[in-house]
Image: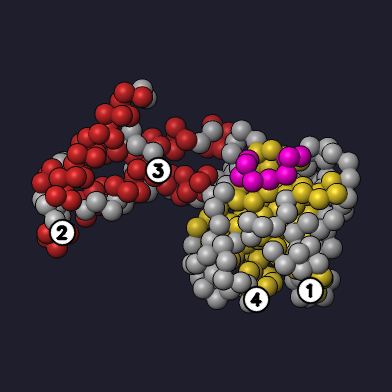
């Protein structure tokens, strides 16, 4: 797609949206639209939408009911086209996104993936956009935060290790103030009051530099197996953090979380190990 084509599409969309706005709110009350936006055929809109990025598409869905309906199908050509442009071939062809059935869901997951700019200098995000690689640096613990944090609502994401855990491997959440690197091999998440973590190596919960008990709370809890997907469930409405393994609910790990913006986070110590995180959206009840 050329820059001229994208620019033309954005100009067209902008003009149509402006015509709606200039007509006041009557198009909303009518349930369809007045002016250009309400009269453009769906096939024309979908063609124009296919040139836009995710941010612009989300704005377009708010213009009027007609545009919103055109974007409602999360597996439409619009979302498929954007998925093909935004995500790597590796991410689309592998099983990384296997639990996300729609193109729009895959795009949202990429938008929420681990950040290549908010992490330790000893790690990097691979070209697939979802997997964190830790370089073999001695006497260092290294972490990363997700690109987007949450201050409200319910959210779920999956995390799995694709290499050895080493002596410490922690998954959880952190504020923007939590450190993402420190000297030595420690449980980085949970070392202060700005992060909460579950150490998969010894099944301990960690916060504010203290061990908050074993997790899950059962006798002879199984150890984490490499490649096993752990589902993290953050409920900012009830201020809790919970975990699932193999679709088995393991229980609430932390309660009374602060009213703050909390980010998905991981920390690792083993050289050349890799950790993948995939945002799933709102968790399913039950």
Residue 196, x across and y down, in percent? 71, 65
Mark 1–mark 4 CB contact (< 8 Å): no
Q: Is residue 184 on the magenta stretch? A: no
Q: Is residue 77 left or right of residue 284?
A: left
Of callouts 2 and 1, which one flags the residue occurring earlier in the amino acid sequence?
A: 2
Residue 101 or residue 241, whichever sits in front:
241
The quadrant of the image that shows the N terminus is: top left
- Can residue 219 be seen here? The reply is yes
The Cα atoms of the two marked residues, 1 and 4, are separated by 11 Å
Q: Which mark is residue 54?
A: 3
- Residue drawn at x 54%, y 33% is 88
Residue identifier under label 4: 255
Magenta range is: 115-123
Which mark, by number, is residue 212?
1
- Label count reads 4
**Disc 2 target residue:** 25
Quote the CA–CA distance across marks 4 and 3: 34 Å
Tell me: residue 86, above or below residue 30: above
Q: Residues within 10 Å of mark 4 (few under 14, many from 20)?
A: few
Q: Secondary structure at mark 3?
A: helix
Foreground mark, 2 or 3, reads 2
Q: Secondary structure at mark 1?
A: strand
Q: Residues within 10 Å of mark 2 (few under 14, many from 20)?
A: few
- Asked whether disc 1 touches disc 3, contact meaning CB atoms under 8 Å apart, the reply is no
Q: Quadrant of residue 258?
A: bottom right
């Amino acid at each position: 797609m050329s820059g001229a084509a994208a620019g033309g599409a954005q100009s067209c969309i902008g003009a149509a949206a402006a015509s709606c706005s200039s007509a006041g709110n009557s198009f909303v009350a009518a349930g369809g639209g007045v002016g250009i936006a309400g009269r453009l055929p769906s096939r024309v809109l979908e063609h124009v939408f296919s040139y836009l990025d995710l941010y612009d598409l989300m704005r377009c869905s708010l213009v009027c009911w007609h545009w919103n309906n055109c974007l409602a199908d999360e597996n439409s050509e619009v979302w498929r086209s954007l998925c093909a442009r935004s995500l790597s071939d590796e991410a689309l062809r592998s099983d990384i996104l296997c639990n996300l059935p729609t193109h729009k869901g895959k795009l949202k997951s990429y938008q929420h993936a681990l950040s290549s700019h908010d992490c330790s200098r000893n790690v990097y995000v691979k070209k697939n956009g979802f997997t964190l690689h830790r370089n073999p640096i001695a006497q260092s613990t290294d972490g990363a935060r997700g690109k987007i944090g949450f201050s409200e609502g319910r959210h779920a994401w999956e995390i799995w290790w694709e290499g050895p855990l080493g002596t410490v491997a922690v998954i959880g959440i952190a504020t923007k103030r939590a450190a993402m690197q420190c000297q030595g091999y420690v449980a980085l998440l949970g070392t202060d009051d700005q992060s909460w973590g579950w150490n998969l190596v010894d099944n301990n919960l960690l916060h504010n530099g203290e061990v908050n008990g074993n997790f899950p709370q059962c006798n002879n809890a199984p150890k984490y197996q490499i490649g096993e997907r752990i589902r993290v469930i953050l409920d900012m409405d009830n201020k809790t953090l919970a975990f699932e393994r193999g679709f088995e609910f393991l229980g609430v790990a932390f309660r009374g979380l602060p009213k703050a913006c909390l980010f998905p986070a991981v920390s690792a110590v083993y050289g050349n190990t890799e950790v993948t995180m995939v945002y799933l959206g709102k968790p399913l009840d039950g």
